[in-house]
């Protein structure tokens, strides 16, 4: 049977492991929450952007399309939005990979 | 009140990293905690392991205990939660009375070998009967009669109100009495 001091030492060791695991779990939840919030923001922005005159060729309609939010030339605007979406996707993928590596280190 | 403030002081010393305070806490509650956990999980190794986990959880969640109940109640509450979680994972194993009797502390002072043997036999009979009770009755009786807690504290640990707990104790005692009477009639 373990002595009281051995039980105390083992309790402290296990407590440190518990504290570390909780910290990792908390930061994972925070990061997941941040990613979800970003996605919700993007979807909300896309929903808020007016869709009128999307297919119209008139200059007035062009000013309401997505690209016109950034530049007066609609085509460049679409390219900018596309590049931004790609960059965001890459960032999310990198964040996910980093989180996974960090969790893997935490388990070791 | 003084006891409560001494407990809080001990708890704060444990949280500030004082190992001697943790050892004092372990010395005070270790045996009772292990026996209580054993009454739920029915395995000595698991009970000792979970006892260490309960103290680890107390240290890891420092600051959560604010003195609304006694430190003993808080600690036993943690132990019950861990033990129930463990017992749900493993199948029901009958309580090994011999293991429990061995866990009992050796009586202090002048006591003959015969008296010690008789005492252990009585404990053995009692624990055999307790082991056959419904888990809730068993936990309630162990907390009140074997761990010396008052009904209010034991009700807090089992997450019941006092009326529910009183009924639990009454029904548990009736069931235990019936089992002990059956045992006596078999002996005769």
Image: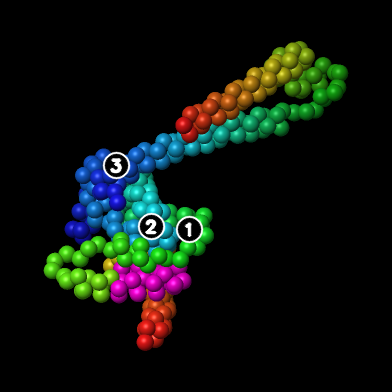
Secondary element at tag 2? helix
Residue, x 26% and y 48% (percent of image)?
A: A3
Q: Chain of mark 1?
A: B
Q: Chain of mark 2?
A: B
* Discs 3, 2: same chain: no
Q: Position of residue B117 (x, y in %)?
A: 25, 71
Is residue B139 rendered magenta in the image?
Answer: yes
> Is A106 rendered above or below residue A83?
below
Residue, x 46% and y 71% (percent of image)?
A: B134
Q: Main secondary structure of the magenta part?
A: helix
Q: Position of residue B152 (x, y in %)?
A: 34, 67
Which residue of the protein is positioned furthest toward the left in this rendering?
A: B110
Secondary element at tag 1? helix
Q: Which residue is mark 3?
A: A9
Q: Which segment did they paint magenta? A: B121-146
Residue, x 21% and y 44% (percent of image)?
A: B20
The Cα–Cα distance between marks 3 and 2, rounded to whole angstroms, is 20 Å
Q: Nearer the viewer, residue A15 or A78?
A: A15
Picture disc at residue B87: 1
> Is B82 rendered above or below residue A53?
below
Q: Quadrant of residue A13?
A: top left
The Cα–Cα distance between marks 2 and 1, rounded to whole angstroms, is 13 Å
The Cα–Cα distance between marks 3 and 1, rounded to whole angstroms, is 26 Å
Is residue A55 left or right of B174 when viewed as pictured? right
Q: Nearer the viewer, residue B125 or A90?
A: B125
Q: Quadrant of residue A56?
A: top right
């Amino acid at each position: 049977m373990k002595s009281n001091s051995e039980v105390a030492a083992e309790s402290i060791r296990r407590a440190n492991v518990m504290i570390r695991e909780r910290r990792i779990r908390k930061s994972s939840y925070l990061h997941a929450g941040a990613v979800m919030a970003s996605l919700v923001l993007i979807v909300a922005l896309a929903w808020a952007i007016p869709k009128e005159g999307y297919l119209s060729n008139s200059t007035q309609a062009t000013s309401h399309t997505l690209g016109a939010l950034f530049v007066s030339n609609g085509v460049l605007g679409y390219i900018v939005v596309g590049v931004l979406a790609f960059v965001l996707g890459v960032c999310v993928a990198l964040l996910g990979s980093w989180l996974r590596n960090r969790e893997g280190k935490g388990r070791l | 009140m003084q006891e409560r403030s001494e407990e809080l002081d001990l708890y704060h010393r444990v949280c500030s990293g004082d190992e001697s305070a943790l050892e004092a806490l372990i010395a005070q509650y270790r045996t009772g905690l292990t026996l209580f956990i054993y009454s739920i999980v029915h395995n000595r190794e698991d009970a000792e392991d979970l006892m260490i986990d309960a103290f680890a959880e107390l240290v890891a969640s420092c600051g959560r205990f604010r003195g609304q109940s006694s430190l003993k109640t808080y600690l036993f509450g943690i132990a019950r939660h861990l033990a129930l979680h463990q017992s749900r994972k493993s199948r029901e194993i009958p309580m090994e009375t011999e293991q429990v009797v061995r866990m009992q502390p050796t009586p202090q002072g002048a006591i003959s070998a015969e008296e010690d043997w008789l005492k252990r036999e009585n404990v053995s009979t009692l624990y055999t009967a307790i082991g056959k009770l419904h888990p809730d009755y068993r936990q309630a009786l162990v907390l009140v009669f074997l761990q010396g807690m008052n009904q209010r504290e034991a009700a807090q640990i089992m997450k019941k109100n006092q009326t529910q707990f009183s009924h639990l104790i009454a029904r548990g005692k009736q069931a235990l009495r019936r089992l002990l009477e059956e045992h006596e009639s078999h002996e005769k």
